[in-house]
Image (cartoon, helix red, strand yellow):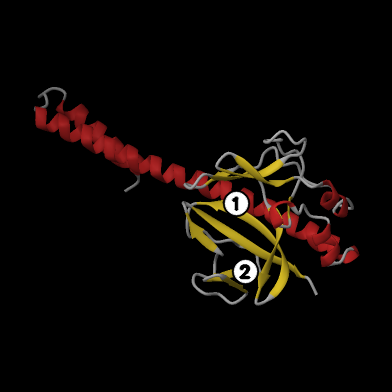
Amino acid sequence: MAHSDAILEVLMLIYKKTNSGFTIVELLLVIVVIGILASITMVGYNGVQQRARNVARTDYASRFNDILEISLIKNTPAAMIAAMDHADGWDKACLGSGYTDRNGDARGDCAVFGGTSYIPDTATFNALLSQTALPSMAAYPPVTSTDGDITYGPFVNVETADGVYVIVLEYVLEGQNQKCALGPLIYQNGAVNTLTPTGNPNYTVSAFGVTECWVMVAKNV
């Protein structure tokens, strides 16, 4: 029975009992049933909204994956890595345009942890992608994990997989154990990254209420 049908039956019960009156127990029972049905409906609605936001995030990631592959026709992986931001010993760069400057350095930021921005918009990297118009990230649905990490869009960075440096497209989905859809994915086996699934093959990491997707774009060979 649909939730709306169940609610209708409750209302019909109320109508039929109007002339004879309700006992306190019957009133409480009706209130409890309506509350339960409303909660179930809200949970279902929230699930639909989450799936819609994750579809949008995956769509953005797919578009950037195509843009990166086009850029690799004219640029080597080494050149792309050299164009990334090298702060804190980590090669990284936001993907897209229109990010908000969250730390006052006149550059947009696509990831913040504990209030501190750690992945910036990088002009030199964007220049390598200039043969394709970069999508605006103004409508991108940000993701907040329970440990305080907020991502405002996908980004690239450099990781190792099976002992080789690789360029990785990363994006985060809302909710745990979500399907990343894109590939090939990089997986974690303890402190080692690998292209061989070590657990659930649908994602890289699932923790803190979110799902991380690490998609290998190219090997630095």
Q: Is residue 114 left or right of residue 137?
A: left
Q: On the picture, is 112 further left or further right than 21?
A: right
Gap between marks 1 and 2 measured at Cα: 20 Å
- The label number, if any, that marks residue 55 in the structure image: 1
Looking at the rendered image, the quarter that the C terminus falls into is bottom right
The residue depicted at 79 percent of the width and 55 percent of the height is: 84
- Please state which of the two labelled residues, at mark 1 or mark 2, is closer to the viewer: 2
Badge 1 marks a residue whose secondary structure is helix
Residue nearest the viewer, comparing 45 with 138: 138
Residue 132 placed where, x, y %? Answer: 86, 51
Amino acid carrying label 2: it is Ile
Horizontal placement of 100 versus 206: left or right?
Answer: right
Nearer-N-terminus badge (1/2): 1
Q: Is residue 33 left or right of residue 178?
A: left
* Mark 1, other Cα within 10 Å: few <14 / some 14–19 / many ≥20: some
- Say what secondary structure mark 2 lies in: loop
Q: Write down the residue under mark 2.
A: 186
Q: Position of residue 210 (x, y in %)?
A: 51, 53
> Label 1 is placed on what type of residue?
Val
- Figure check: 209 above or below 8: below
* The furthest residue to the front: 88
Residue sitting at x 56%, y 52%: 173
The foreground one among 39 and 34 is 39
Q: Residues within 10 Å of mark 2 (few under 14, many from 20)?
A: many
**Residue in the picture at 45% in, 43% down:** 46
Residue 147 spot, x, y in % from top left: 48, 47
Please tell me which residue is depicted at 52% across the width and 71% down the height of the picture: 190
